[in-house]
Image (cartoon, helix red, strand yellow):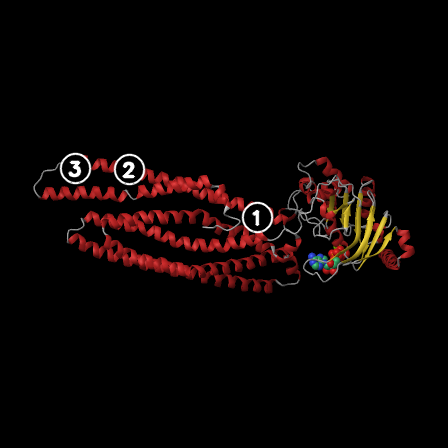
Amino acid sequence: MIFTKHFRKYYLIYAIPLILGLAVLIAVDYFQLIIPEVTGDIIGTYRRANQDIAAGAIITEDSLLRQILPHLGKLLILLAIVAFGRFLWRLFIFGTSRKIEEDVRNEMFEHATKLSNSFYSKEKVGGLMTYFINDLGAVRMAFGPGLLMIVDGIFLGGLTLYKMFKMDVMMTVYAFIPMVALAILMFILRKSMREKFRARQESFESMSDYVQENLSGISVIKAYVKEASSALRFEYRTKDFFDKNIAFVRQRLYFQMAITIAINTVIFTLIGYGSYLVIYHTFTPEDLMVYLTYFGTLTWPVMALVRVITISSQAGASAQRIGEFFDAEIEVNDDLAVETPELCGSITASNLSFSYPDDPEILILKDISFEIKEGEMVGILGRTGSGKSTLVDLLLRVYNVELDTLYIDSHDIITIPLKQLRDTIGYVPQDNFLFSDTIKANIGFSQAEIDIEKVVDAAKLSDVYTNIIEFKEGFDTILGERGVTVSGGQKQRISIARALTKDPKVLILDDSVSAVDTKTEEAIIKNLSQVRKNKTTIFIAHRISTVRHMDKILLLDDGKLVGNGSHEELLKVSPLYQEMVRLQTLDRLEDEKGGDLDA
Ligand code: ATP
Ligand code: MG
């Protein structure tokens, strides 16, 4: 049984089916224990008839049949009740446990989507999958079979023992002592079972992480011919999982052996002592049969209670792991949010500094101040690692910033509800990720109902329309694992189209045209400057050619803002900008010369 923080509410939510299920279960137990009595009555009737016949009485088959028929009728009704009852409690109890599993899984996924990037930089996706599958499965076992076994074990066990006691006290004491010893042993071993199970789950998690990461990076492994070493490292993990599994199973096996030995000892004692009672006329033969049937019935509750120990120790370990996952803090939240009017899209940074949570000592952005007016088209330029993507992450509130450092319009970004903030911004990430779905669904990702006209318009604006219609299935082409692979440049442009369908107040493109040629780049920028009139657009780039015509360029260097102005202004005042222009012009001239020579 699990009563930890994140799970106990389900007993209340599903109280009705659970109570109904348990009530039916108890009723079935009660009726089930009448069956041996009826069987005993039938056999007793035959035995007495035989005795009477031996004493010279005449009993016809007809009269014997008449005596037996009511018993048979009773037996039939009992069997039917038990069968139907078993179906019903399965439906209620197991059905509820599946429902709870589904609810928790949905809740886990929702929580997973809210957790911040810093959580995912520590926890690997492959490992998290085991929470969703194995651990949740173990928890379900506690709610379904676990709950059933506890109630059944206690009630059926108690009732059976009562009936056995009523028949013969001494014999029941003989039967009971080994069973009690067994239960005590189980209780003592419980903790180590739980630890072994946790170790097994953790080993499984590590193995699953490894598979996920290595299969995602399979092309790198192949390119570096690391298949063999990658497989060898996997073998260490499977070996570890095997060892942990064996340790766990071995303990379970000891359990089961102890049970079998205890039960066999008892059966032998009962038949021996029972024979003595029959010989000395305290018991009739049918009494002994009924008693042995009771004992047979008792083995299930004992087994069930033992299984409950395994199930609950596994579920306890898993519930603890899932609980830790649920307790992982949602760092980026709406705690300080206030109702905010519709945003227009001006951005102000005021002495903004930032370091990543895992590296609080290293300042990535240093004392940055700037202003972007509503409707401006702004380029952010800077060498690799200068902090451009980090700045965008802060605008999207992927990470928290300090109060009074970053504003959208005149609202501190911390006070803007997250949904509203992110709805306002269209974002094309640097490592643009596409879902394995149709191109249409990828581009129309922001729309509740895909509006194909808008999707087509966005594709035209990002200059990928002609590529898409060349695919056999056009916009219905499926991308990724299940479909075609698009080129780096096509991927970038599909990502741009995805952001454009949102028609956001602020559009941010992080290095989004790096993989397309300059002609396509020019076409995209021209299209964007037309459709984004009066709407803020931020272009992160490495190439001067991308940003030179923009209203304003922010130049970052090693986390500091070292230039803020138009191309012409920066050319006059910024040595770094002058240097970048010089180098990039040289590059271009060399390219052109190379081109001429090729021709
Ligand atoms: P590029 O042009 O290559 O995309 P960038 O200007 O976008 O570079 P950022 O991605 O903002 O650079 O990175 C700035 C610095 O922050 C780098 O030194 C990087 O190592 C560091 N950094 C980035 N992400 C994290 C993170 N999650 N945790 C810690 N440090 C990080
Ligand atoms: Mg970047």
Three-letter amino acid code at the position of disc 3: Leu
Residue 388: x %, y % from top left: 77, 54
Q: Give the number of callouts.
A: 3
**Marks 1 and 3 in Cβ contact (< 8 Å):** no
Residues under labels 1 and 3: Cα distance?
A: 65 Å
- Name the foreground residue: 574 vs 585: 574
Q: Dot 2, crowdedness within 10 Å: few (<14), some or many (≥20)?
A: few
Disc 3: which residue: 64
**Marks 2 and 1 in Cβ contact (< 8 Å):** no
Three-letter amino acid code at the position of disc 2: Leu
Residue 514: x %, y % from top left: 78, 52
Which type of secondary structure does the marked residue at label 1 adopt? helix
**Marks 2 and 3 in Cβ contact (< 8 Å):** no
- Name the foreground residue: 471 vs 516: 516
Residue positioned most to the right = 572
Q: Quadrant of the C terminus?
A: bottom right
Residues under labels 2 and 3: Cα distance?
A: 18 Å
- Name the foreground residue: 38 vs 530: 38
1 or 3: tag closer to the N-terminus = 3
Residue 575: x %, y % from top left: 88, 59
Q: Is residue 542 visible?
A: no
Dot 1 beta carbon under 8 Å from ligand 1? no
Give me the disc on residue 76.
2
Which type of secondary structure does the marked residue at label 3 adopt? helix
8 left or right, relative to 569: left
Disc 1: which residue: 108
Residue 323: x %, y % from top left: 54, 52
Residue under the image location 48 percent in, 48 percent down:
140
Mark whose residue sits in front, 2 or 1: 1
Residues under labels 2 and 1: Cα distance?
A: 47 Å
Residue under the image location 88 percent in, 51 percent down:
567
2 or 3: tag closer to the N-terminus = 3
